[in-house]
Image (cartoon, rainbow, N blue to C red):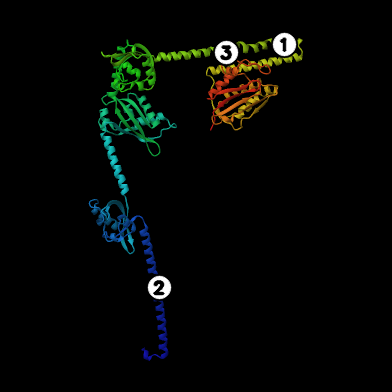
């Protein structure tokens, strides 16, 4: 049906339908246009984000097409080459390569393989900057997508510093290897099959068994092979058992000391491959792994066989000279007027401690050998002509020891009376001088021992005899006439017996401790000790004695006072000093045990202060001396021997301290002693 046959209404309806269709198509078109714009905008933003990330990475990144041309690079690549990105884009690796430093064909093949297979590759590449500067870089390549195409992505970083380090290490290794192989000193490495633990928790003997069978020479230089007269093939693989087969125990001791200390320097005797003995001076250093286990050791050995043989020959020579000069006083010398040796025999060299005449000739006698130039000047003044007069004087040996010489010397002059040299025969009398000093010391010691013996017998004869005698008489009297005494009298006698037995016990206790001290039987065991508690225990022990005289005992030592002392010895000191204070204090007195704060910076100073009789300066000077007898009775007639103070002095000195007394007659005494201060 054509349009002419349609009615007007039909045509109008078709027009309306066409308009609707048009509007629909228009909406669809506009929607697709908007979606396309959004997609393009997202694509732009994605690309921008990619570019931002791409260019902010420090690592150099290159995008290469299949032909190997750079189609994009980031700012990291531009910085690496010190140029702009645009200067790199469009180039290929051969254009930025350092001439003659790379295998470009091999690199091109690796890139092609990566592009084809997708398997990444890595290689070093020597590049050249626009300035002509060349540098190494580490390159890694991957196959990837660059927007809508397959590409090769390469990352690179400058490894100049690493290469320089490698070059330095190679050079050092080359130098070290050259030194190792060319040195005339023997070097070797001796490694253990499996690292070992070496400490006190393991069975060291069992470990040594393993080491002696499984530690082997792994590297050795020619110098060491020459020392043993061996070939490398025969030497590498040798174990400690091979080297010490003739003296295994000595070898095990040496290995044990090396492992204990980690390093050793010592002389050793071994044997060449032909059985000839050889002497070494060696330095040996243990090698460790990251866990601290011993993996082996490095050794340096110097052949000292010639030196050892020379020393042995020298000993023979010295023996001959010694026999030859047996009839001489000791040494013979000649010296110049200005104080240098011209000649000296071996005995003189030995006496002065010098190894050779050549060495002795370099010594300036006045400033080096004499104790002081003034002593030499004094000798010259007393015997200016040296007419065979016997002189006795002191000299210094090479090592600084003082030696005494008896010298019969003279000047040798020319026909005009000018001094040519000074010569003399010397005798070393150091031993005699030392013997004289020992004799003087022995005499003093003997006097002291005699005084000690006399004092000991005096104590036994008098101080011990008297209380025992009194004890015996009272007991005999009570036994013979018991019924004739009243209860009060018998009680009084028993009180006297009690006091006598107490004195006798104290004396015997001090005698026993003193005897043990003199024979060295007292153990000294210092530990951290609370001095307040020691003083408190002492006062508790003596409280009954103090109450009899109505004496107040005060402990003013701070409760937290700690010192490193032997508590048993300090207890004896405190008991003796406090007991003496009670003995010589008046009725109703006061005794204080305390610390002297003025000594805190030097140690602890303990004092025992009483308000008793006091002492005269004469008696103070007799205290603490075994050969002096200070016989002063206490306020209640108590008698002492002074032996307790001798014990106090010895025990205080065992602690490195000192003891002294300050006293005034009629006022009282203060005994003080020092002890170590604990930090």
What percent of the width, then of the height, locates residue 548?
A: 70, 21
Mark 3 vs mark 2, foreground winner is 3
Residue ID at (29%, 40%): 173
| Residue position for label 3 | 455
Q: Is residue 399 above or below residue 679?
A: above
Mark 1 vs mark 3, foreground winner is 3
Question: Residue 599, located in which quarter of the rendered image?
Answer: top right
Picture quarter with the N terminus: bottom left
Helix, strand or loop at label 1? It is: helix
Question: Residue 239, located in which quarter of the rendered image?
Answer: top left
Q: Local crowd at mark 3 within 10 Å, few (<14), some, or many (≥20)?
A: some
| Of the pair 465 and 143, the residue shown nearer to us | 465
Q: Is residue 118 above or below residue 548?
A: below
Relative placement, left or right, of 616 versus 253 is right
Q: Residue most toward the front?
A: 416
| Residue position for label 2 | 34
Helix, strand or loop at label 3? It is: helix
């Amino acid at each position: 049906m054509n349009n002419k046959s349609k009615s007007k209404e039909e045509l109008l309806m078709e027009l309306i339908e066409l308009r609707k269709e048009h509007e629909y198509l228009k909406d669809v078109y506009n929607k697709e246009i908007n979606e396309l714009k959004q997609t393009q905008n997202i694509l732009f933003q994605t690309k921008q984000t990619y570019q931002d990330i791409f260019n902010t990475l420090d690592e150099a990144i290159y995008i290469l097409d299949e032909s190997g041309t750079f189609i994009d690079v980031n700012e990291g690549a531009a910085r690496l080459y010190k140029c702009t990105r645009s200067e790199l884009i469009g180039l290929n690796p051969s254009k930025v390569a350092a001439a003659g430093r790379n295998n470009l064909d091999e690199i091109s093949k690796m890139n092609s393989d990566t592009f084809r297979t997708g398997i990444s590759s890595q290689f070093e590449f020597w590049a050249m900057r626009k300035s002509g500067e060349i540098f190494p870089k580490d390159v890694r390549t991957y196959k990837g997508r660059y927007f809508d195409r397959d590409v090769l992505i390469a990352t690179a970083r400058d490894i100049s510093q690493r290469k320089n380090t490698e070059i330095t290490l190679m050079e050092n290794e080359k130098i070290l290897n050259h030194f190792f192989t060319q040195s005339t000193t023997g070097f070797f490495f001796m490694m253990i099959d499996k690292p070992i633990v070496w400490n006190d928790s393991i069975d060291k003997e069992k470990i040594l068994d393993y080491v002696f069978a499984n530690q082997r020479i792994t590297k050795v230089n020619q110098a060491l092979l020459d020392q043993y007269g061996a070939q490398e093939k025969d030497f590498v693989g040798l174990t400690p058992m091979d080297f010490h087969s003739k003296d295994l125990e000595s070898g095990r001791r040496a290995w044990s000391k090396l492992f204990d200390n980690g390093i050793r320097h010592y002389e050793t005797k071994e044997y060449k491959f032909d059985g000839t003995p050889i002497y070494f001076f060696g330095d040996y250093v243990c090698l460790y792994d990251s866990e601290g286990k011993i993996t082996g050791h490095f050794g340096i050995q110097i052949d000292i066989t010639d030196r050892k043989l020379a020393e042995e020959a020298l000993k023979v020579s010295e023996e001959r000279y010694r026999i030859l000069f047996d009839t001489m006083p000791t040494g013979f010398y000649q010296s110049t007027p200005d104080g240098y040796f011209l000649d000296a025999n071996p005995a003189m060299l030995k006496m002065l401690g010098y190894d050779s005449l050549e060495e002795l000739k370099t010594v300036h006698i006045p400033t080096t050998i004499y104790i002081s130039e003034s002593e030499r000047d004094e000798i010259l003044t007393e015997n200016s002509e040296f007419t065979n007069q016997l002189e006795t004087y002191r000299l210094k040996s090479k090592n600084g020891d003082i030696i005494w010489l008896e010298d019969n010397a003279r000047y040798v002059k020319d026909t005009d009376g000018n001094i040519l040299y000074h010569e003399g025969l010397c005798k070393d009398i150091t031993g005699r001088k030392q013997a004289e000093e020992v004799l003087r010391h022995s005499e003093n010691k003997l006097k002291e021992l005699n005084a000690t013996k006399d004092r000991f017998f005096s104590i036994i004869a008098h101080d011990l005899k008297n209380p025992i005698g009194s004890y015996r008489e009272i007991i005999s009297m009570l036994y013979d006439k018991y019924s004739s005494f009243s209860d009060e009298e018998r009680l009084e006698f028993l009180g006297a017996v009690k006091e006598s037995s107490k004195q006798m016990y104290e004396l015997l206790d001090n005698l026993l401790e003193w005897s043990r001290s003199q024979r060295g039987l007292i153990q000294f065991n210092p530990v951290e000790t609370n001095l307040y508690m020691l003083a408190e225990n002492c006062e508790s022990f003596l409280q009954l004695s103090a109450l009899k005289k109505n004496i107040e005992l005060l402990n003013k030592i701070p409760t937290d006072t700690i010192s490193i002392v032997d508590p048993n010895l300090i207890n004896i000191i405190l008991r003796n000093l406090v007991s003496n204070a009670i003995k010589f204090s008046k009725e109703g007195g006061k005794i204080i045990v305390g610390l002297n704060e003025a000594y805190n910076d030097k140690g602890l100073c303990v004092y025992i202060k009483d308000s008793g009789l006091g002492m005269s300066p004469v008696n103070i000077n007799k205290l603490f001396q075994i050969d002096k007898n200070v016989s002063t009775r206490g306020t209640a007639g108590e008698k002492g021997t002074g032996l307790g103070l001798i014990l106090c002095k010895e025990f205080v000195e065992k602690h490195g301290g000192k003891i002294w007394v300050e006293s005034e007659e009629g006022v009282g005494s203060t005994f003080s002693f020092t002890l170590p201060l604990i930090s």
